[in-house]
Amino acid sequence: MHSARRPSCISAQYCLFPPFSVRWRGLLGVSIALAVCGLAGVLYGLIVFKRAGRQSGYIPVFEDWLFHVVLPLIAYALLAVAGFSLRSYPGSVLFMVAASALLLLFVGIHNAWDTVTFIAVGRWQAGGHSEETKPAKGDH
């Protein structure tokens, strides 16, 4: 699923976006930054959704849709909502941003693990090994 395998650094950059640690003079700048990051993430998620549906080399399964499309879209939409509601509900927005960052962090960890597993299994199969020929648990 080449098109939907977003680099983990894309999700991580939204988790650790540097301007959020800057001293802001008011809430307007923070609100704009949150909304723009959230909307950019939603747009990127929709592009991933479109590309994943069009590819022919791999048919995405439920887990692929969940971790590459649905959960990131939820996180980015939550970030956009946080940006639009910051001035009205500043206390609640802190929890929205934290939830969005935590969700993107977990998605990034899952996708990185998924990629490592895919590469390891691919190399194992390329080496001519099958399930019957793999070493026992105690063998290295």
Image: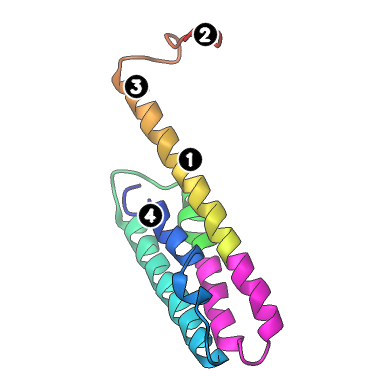
Q: CA distance from mark 3 to mark 4?
A: 24 Å
Name which of mark 1 and mark 4 comes first in the sequence.
Answer: 4
Name which of mark 3 and mark 2 comes first in the sequence.
Answer: 3
Quick check: 129 left or right of 38?
left
Near mark 4 (Cα within 10 A), the count class, few <14, some 14-19 or many ≥20, is: some
Near mark 1 (Cα within 10 A), the count class, few <14, some 14-19 or many ≥20, is: few
Residue at point 35% right, 47% down?
1
Tell me, yes or no, whether the two marked residues, 2 and 1, touch with CB atoms within 8 Å.
Answer: no
Quadrant of the rendered image containing residue 54: bottom left
In the image shown, does 4 or 7 lie closer to the viewer? 7
Name which of mark 2 and mark 1 comes first in the sequence.
Answer: 1
Q: CA distance from mark 3 to mark 1?
A: 18 Å
| Type of the residue with mark 3 | Gln
- In the picture, the disc for residue 6 is 4
Can I make out residue 43 in this image?
yes
SS under mark 4: loop
x%, y% of residue 23? 52, 82
Magenta highlight range:
73-100
x%, y% of residue 22? 50, 78
Residue under label 1, please give it: 113
Name which of mark 3 and mark 1 comes first in the sequence.
Answer: 1
| Type of the residue with mark 4 | Arg
Q: Is residue 89 magenta?
A: yes
Residue under label 2, please give it: 136
Q: Main secondary structure of the magenta part?
A: helix
Residue under label 3, please give it: 125
